[in-house]
Image (tube, helix red, strand yellow):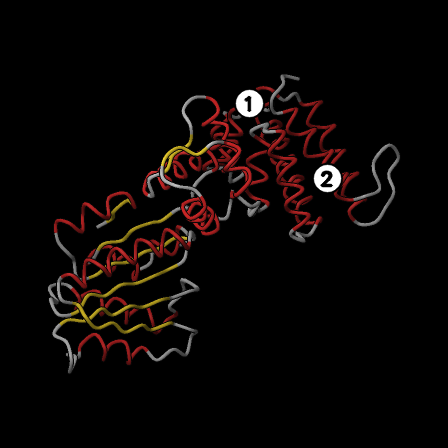
Amino acid sequence: MQLALPQIQAHLQKGLRSLYALHGDEALLVQEAADAIRAAARSQGFTERSVHVVSGAHFDWSEVLAAGGSMSLFADKQILEIRIPTGKPGKEGSPMIQQLAQTAEGNDSTLTLFILPRLDAATKKGAWFGALDQYGVTVQIDSLDRAQLPQWIAQRLKLQGQSVVAGQEGQNCLQFFADRVEGNLLAAHQEIQKLGLLFPAGELTQAQVESAVLNVARYDVFKLSESVLSGQMARVQRMLDGLQAEGEAAVLVHYTLAEDIRALKRVKDAMAEGKPLPMALREQRIWGVREKLFERVLPRLSASRLAQLLQNAHQVDGIVKGLKVADWPTDPWQALNRLALRLASACTTKS
């Protein structure tokens, strides 16, 4: 049985299942979902808890099976928590998990909770994860998109009796807050709690928020790619500055930008040869968010513009590797900035 994250509280109010699996890469949301399950279990008499961390291929699964099948000397009910940080239980672990899932069904004395990282599509099709889904409840916990952050912040402020001022000032305040905490939800949660300590319940002004909220944003090159293809110029600039400050390798940033340009060029060339856009995208393994972005920007990009961008990417490749190129900055990050902004601009204006 699959559940969405917002459905957990309503599900728990109806009654506990004996097996849960949380999988996702947003630590705060995974932690909160696990806390909610544990709290519901404790209210129903699950007073003892054992935690097992699967640390590698030689992990002793017999201990987990024994814990799951044993009765506590001090409590009638127990929580058996199994954490697999890699998301890979190994050859021995897969049948063990299937066995645990089967025996968990109908077991009123043990609640089994698996905590997993973000899983790829192939892993979710595996037999062990299929058993968790069949005999228990699985919850996929995704990271929040930048567009979702302002509303999430507003909801969290409301829980502690605070809100931003109404109107455009309040919207600007939430956008400012989101810019400062993007990609770092745990720190965002801490900044929200800090506002609760610094200021009384009620409305917060933008000046109060700006004076209190630290810049704890964290970025990755994959989100940079989405921002560039979306034509979000200011955000692209902010993300590049953040990636440089965090010590990200310039060569990796260049590879990401160049790969987007190459993929756009290949799809454009395939369409020029008569292939439908959906087929061209599939052949280049473009799907999900990138597929939608490609569908939006490709009609705006001419073959000549893409050829020029590809030449620019080749020039920046040399700069990143220490070469000098005429009419380009010698600093790799300045060159990356120019390349990213040229691509972002091309994605917003018809050429």
For this rendering, which residue is in front, 76 or 195? 195
Q: Residue at x 61, y 37 (%)?
A: 260
In percent of width and height, residue 134 lies at: 21, 56
> Could you tell whether 172 is left or right of 70 in the image?
right
In percent of width and height, residue 100 lies at: 22, 69
Which residue lies under the disc numbered 1? 274
Which residue lies under the disc numbered 2? 336
- What amino acid is at disc 2? Leu
Secondary structure under tag 2 reads: helix
Q: Residue at x 48, y 25 (%)?
A: 169
- In this rendering, is residue 305 above or below 319? above
Q: Residue at x 76, y 34 (%)?
A: 312
Q: Please, which residue is most extreme toward the top here?
A: 350
Q: Nearer the viewer, mark 2 or mark 1?
A: 2
In percent of width and height, residue 345 lies at: 65, 25
Upstream in the sequence, badge 2 or badge 1? Answer: 1
Q: Please, which residue is most extreme toward the front here?
A: 200
For this rendering, which residue is in front, 197 or 94? 197
Instruction: Count numbered badges in the picture.
Output: 2
Secondary structure under tag 1 reads: loop
- What amino acid is at disc 1? Gly
- In this rendering, is residue 315 above or below 251? above
In which quadrant is the C terminus drawn? top right
In percent of width and height, residue 189 lies at: 43, 48
Q: Quadrant of residue 112?
A: bottom left
